[in-house]
Image (spheres, rainbow, N blue to C red):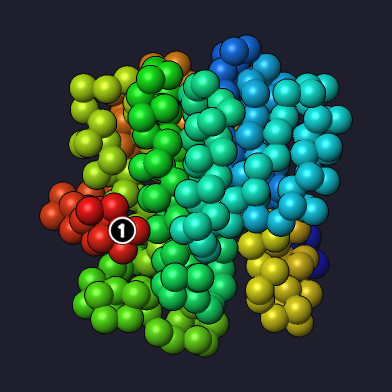
Amino acid sequence: MSCFLICGALFVVAAYFYREVIVKGQRCTSAVRLHGKTAIVTGSNTGIGKRTAVDLAKRGARVIMACRSRERGEAAMEDVKRESGSSDVVFLPLDLASFKSIREFAENFLKSEPRLDLLINNAGLYSGGRTQEGFGMMFGVNHLGHFLLTDLLLDRLKESGPSRVVNVSSMGHNVGRVDFDCLNKNKALGLGTSMFDLLQIYADSKLCNVLFTHELNKRLQGTKVTCYSLHPGAINSELDRNFSRVLVWVLSPVTAFFFKTPEQGCQTTLHCALQPGLEPLSGRYFSNCTVRNVFAKARDDAAARKLWELSERMCGME
């Protein structure tokens, strides 16, 4: 009996340590204030995007909440205003699955906003289907939409420098791959529709985020714009909304205990956006508020350049 009690006690201690140290992780320690600064946060109507918007608004930034759903975006905007105590929070519609919507968003923003200090490409989804232009949904939204958005806003970022671009990726990029033949033939990272196929395509899109950041940094040399990619942690958020409801229910006790809350999950985003002195680390990948080394495939110069050039063609930017 005593052996079982000891083992049980050790398990409880280990679980507590894991939750407190590994799951909760580090917090952004920057005390930077953002009065007079403007930030865009995509996908900020829920999850870590919404918590990021609240934090930036509390610091005095003018926050542009870029979300697909007007109803949910405007409701979230009111929440952010209330929680932050700031009235300088604006909703602008942005559907990253539509080049037309992205261009309209950029046009409206550039007409109404004189500066842009932080572009936080936070939105992401796990879903099958196709975008309006016929691209695979996760490639189109998770990578291509943010690629086009960043390009359209890059001059304003340069004018407002020092400024930063923060791309929310995932540790899933470690098992990702970029199949350029599939992209050229099918406008998608993969064609499977099973849960495992979609998980692989999601990881592929997250590798695109890291490669995009790697190449963007090279093209920003000589400017006052820096860029960073990151893993926010496993988040108990709405990313699983396209999973089977039964699977979500079965896994809910696990996700509740072992996954970060959105508040905990936005800390590395905030670190990359706000921490002073990160400029020499532009183009790098962060996790748990710490710069991390990545596998060779995530810093492959040739692959990053090829992805950039293909993305330009697909967005009609040539």
Q: Where is residue 251, by image quadrant?
A: bottom right
Instruction: Kindly identify the amino acid type of the residue bearing the numbered disc 1.
Output: Gly
Q: Is residue 91 visible?
A: yes
Q: Count residues near mark 1 (Cα–Cα under 10 Å), then give few for <14, some for 14-19, many for 20+.
A: few
- Residue 265 on image: x %, y %: 62, 44
Q: Is residue 221 above or below residue 52?
A: above
Residue drawn 21% across and 22% down? 222
Residue 17 relative to residue 257: left or right: left
Relative to 209, does residue 3 appear above or below in the rendering? below
Q: Which residue is mark 1?
A: 316
**Residue 305 spot, x, y in % from top left:** 18, 52
- Residue 307 visible in this rendered orientation of the protein: no
Point 13% across, 55% down: residue: 302
Nearer the observer, 110 or 176: 110
Horizontal relation, residue 27 to residue 190: left or right: right
Residue at screen point 75% across, 79% down: 245
Number of numbered callouts drawn: 1
